[in-house]
């Protein structure tokens, strides 16, 4: 059973975040549990993520020092009492390996210190104001104390879930350039690797690695021990109460990929920061069928401020998250305990989720275009990030259903075959096993669109047989004369269907094979000659491959050339009958289709938070005529017609976000 199936309430949760680092819990305790519960109810929320440890503990315990202003109070107990009988769930936040006040580490818990070569603690960093914070060593006495704290929390409080901000190693704003030299670490490293723990001076010169082999050994050891700690926490949460466990995906990002993937598999879900990380992470979450929380609000230095514009942005981010398949969590939610006069947009977002909960529950995202992205949540190159953003924009501009396929899924043919089309950006690197699976995917009927350096691994073009290309030596004299300071000079694409010159960059020198078709050429501005093919179509087995000989997705992210969308639409015509839903709109919209038996829901979301009215027409593939089509945001019935296997909705207008429910008769 997947986490989404085991904890459907969490997949549908409407969560207000009351974090230990923000008002009303920090910098001073201004907390009123009754006021919090009233705020939650007014916002149509039904879940609170509540901080039990921030810089200090906010519950009475013997393991973590208490907040200086806490006295005899227990803020989690007060919240649970106030929420009693009000159908509000409480998920406890626990920081694990997170930075703590320097004075706490030096004076109250010296046994937790993370030690450098000279026996000092790392330089402190600022975390939401106040005293500088430093990391604990997660493998010494802190290891036992944090496990005891979590055991006490789970055994003595009627919480509904656990969220871990961690486990981190050397939490110092995600630095990896320090290794703890405490006695416990020296002993553990020696016992578990047979090696002497290296000093930082042997590993790093400032922030530069000077011994890559030793650093790789250290990283793997750290990843393994963090996973062991994580596994023990999961066991504590599951053993007696079977609590769902979420964690911050950043906790696994700095370790080798195998440990990140193990942690993602072990947890029931993970939290993503706002912006593009959400899109990439939602793809990873969909692959593992995990519950994904996504912040609605980036970090701010003014956490008490609530304005109509701020709350509209929170609302928009929430709708965007729902469209992508995640669960929105209202970050900095404590601000509404001070002033909730502007909370209407947030209440509308949660009201939409509340009013349609039974209909939307257990829906799954339909598959059509699968964009290949790296398995990791973070640590992507600048080019890879631009490629992912541009790929998503490109297909959304074409008005088709788009999702993310992690490159870890490229060894699973059944996963790939859920997608009629795979889009392979050139900045994703794969190996021979993944190449073999992609080859089989196309051979058995799939369509693949690849760009730029697609499948370039160890300087070998692994999939050139799929693309129908031969790599040739470049004309060095010509290449030298075409150099620009940031790319190529006066080079263009000329598409056979349209003579308009289009920009290209970073192409490969290739020829197409006799059994493939050239659809476009790369030419110099003088048009004196064709330099090399730009777009190739090649049949392979029962499937088709298109190779675009430049990073079209990165260029679209930068320039948004509309003709690039026309090129993509031409390629999609091959699979038009398999497209589950297609929209026509004068502006780009995020689009997704969620479905279950007898229900299909089309999500449409404005890519920006700017208020705008959209008029859209949609074609939904269906063997059956619709019994009812209506807007989930307004409740209004929508006119539609049925023609040749398509439910057609024409000229429907809405503002910023819409969810259209299509109710079908039972088969």
Image (cartoon, helix red, strand yellow):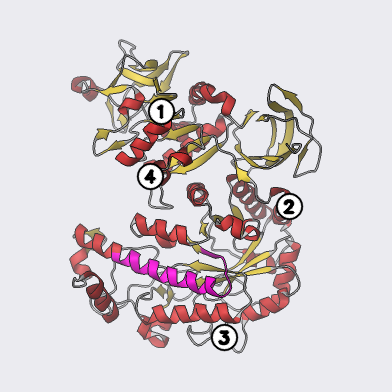
Number of the label disc, if any, that sits on residue 358: 2
Q: Earlier in the sequence, mark 3 or mark 4?
A: 3
Gap between marks 2 and 1 measured at Cα: 41 Å
Count numbered badges in the picture: 4
Choose top left, top right, bottom left or bottom right for residue 196: bottom left
* Residue 377 x/y as whole percent: 44, 52
Local SS, label 2: helix
Q: Secondary structure at mark 3?
A: loop
Residue at mark 1: 443
Residue 206 location (% of width, % of height): 24, 63
Badge 3: residue crowd in 10 Å (few <14, some 14–19, many ≥20): many
Whichever of labels 1 and 3 marks the residue nearer the N terminus, that label is 3
Tell me which label, 3 or 2, sits earlier in the chain: 3
Distance from Cα at disc 1 to Cα at disc 4:
33 Å
Can you identify the residue that label 3 sits on? 60
Is residue 551 shown left or right of residue 627?
A: left
Which of the two discs, 1 and 4, labels the residue nearer the N terminus? Answer: 4
Q: Earlier in the sequence, mark 2 or mark 1?
A: 2
The answer to whether the residue labelled 1 contacts the one labelled 4, judged by CB atoms less than 8 Å apart, is no
């Amino acid at each position: 059973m997947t986490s989404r199936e085991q904890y459907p309430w969490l997949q549908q949760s409407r969560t207000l975040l009351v974090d230990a680092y923000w008002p009303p819990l920090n910098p001073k305790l201004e907390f009123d549990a009754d006021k919090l519960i009233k705020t939650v109810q007014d916002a149509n929320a039904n879940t609170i993520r509540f901080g039990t440890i921030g810089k200090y503990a906010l519950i009475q315990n013997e393991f973590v020092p208490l907040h200086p202003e806490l006295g005899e109070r227990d803020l989690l107990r007060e919240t649970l009492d106030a929420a009693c009988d009000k159908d509000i769930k409480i998920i406890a936040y626990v920081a694990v390996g997170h930075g703590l006040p320097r004075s706490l580490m030096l004076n109250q818990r010296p046994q937790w210190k993370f030690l450098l070569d000279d026996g000092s603690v790392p330089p402190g960093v600022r975390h939401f104001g106040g005293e500088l914070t430093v990391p604990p060593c997660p493998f010494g006495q802190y290891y036992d104390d944090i496990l005891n704290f979590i055991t006490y929390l789970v055994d003595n409080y009627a919480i509904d879930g656990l969220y871990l901000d961690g486990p981190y190693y050397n939490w110092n704003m995600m630095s990896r350039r320090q290794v703890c030299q405490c006695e416990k670490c020296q002993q553990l490293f020696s016992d578990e690797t047979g090696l002497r723990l290296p000093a930082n001076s042997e590993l790093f010169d400032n922030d530069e690695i000077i011994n890559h082999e030793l650093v790789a050994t250290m990283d793997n050891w750290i990843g393994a021990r963090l996973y062991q700690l994580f596994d023990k926490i999961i066991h504590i949460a599951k053993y007696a109460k079977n609590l769902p466990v979420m964690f911050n995906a950043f906790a696994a990002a700095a370790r080798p990929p195998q440990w990140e993937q193990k942690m993602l598999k072990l947890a029931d879900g993970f939290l993503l920061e706002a912006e593009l990380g959400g899109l990439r992470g939602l793809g990873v979450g969909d692959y593992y069928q995990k519950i994904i929380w996504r912040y609605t609000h980036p970090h701010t230095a003014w956490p008490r401020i609530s304005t109509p514009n701020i709350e509209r942005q929170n609302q928009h981010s929430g709708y965007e998250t729902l469209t992508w398949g995640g669960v929105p969590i209202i970050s900095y939610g404590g601000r509404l305990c001070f002033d909730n006069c502007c909370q209407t947009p947030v209440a509308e977002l949660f009201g939409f989720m509340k009013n349609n909960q039974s209909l939307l529950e257990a829906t799954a995202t339909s598959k059509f275009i699968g964009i290949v992205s790296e398995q990791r949540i973070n640590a992507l190159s600048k080019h890879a990030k631009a490629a992912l953003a541009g790929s998503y924009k490109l297909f959304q501009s074409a008005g088709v259903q788009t999702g993310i396929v992690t490159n870890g899924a490229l060894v699973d043919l059944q996963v790939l075959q859920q997608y009629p089309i795979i889009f392979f950006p050139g900045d994703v690197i794969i190996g021979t096993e993944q190449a073999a699976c992609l080859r089989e995917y196309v051979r058995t009927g799939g369509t693949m669109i690849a760009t730029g350096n697609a499948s370039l691994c160890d300087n070998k073009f692994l999939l050139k047989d799929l693309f129908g290309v031969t790599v040739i030596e470049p004309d060095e004299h010509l290449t030298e004369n075409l150099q620009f300071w940031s790319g190529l000079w006066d080079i263009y694409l000329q598409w056979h269907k349209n003579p308009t010159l289009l920009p290209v960059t970073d192409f490969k020198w290739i020829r197409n094979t006799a059994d493939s078709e050239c659809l476009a050429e790369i030419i110099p501005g003088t048009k004196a000659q064709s330099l090399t093919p730009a777009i190739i179509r090649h049949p392979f087995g029962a499937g088709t491959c298109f190779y675009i000989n430049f990073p079209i997705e990165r260029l679209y992210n930068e320039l948004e050339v509309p003709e690039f969308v026309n090129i993509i639409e031409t390629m999609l015509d091959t699979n038009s009958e398999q497209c589950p839903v297609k929209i026509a709109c004068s502006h780009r919209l995020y689009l997704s289709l969620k479905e279950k038996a007898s229900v299909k829901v089309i999500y449409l979301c404005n890519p920006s938070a700017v208020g705008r009215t959209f008029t859209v027409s949609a074609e939904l593939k269906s063997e059956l005529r619709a019994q009812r089509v209506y807007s989930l945001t307004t409740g209004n019935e929508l006119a539609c017609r049925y023609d040749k296997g398509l439910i057609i909705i024409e000229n429907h207008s809405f503002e910023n976000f819409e969810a259209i429910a299509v109710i079908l008769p039972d088969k």
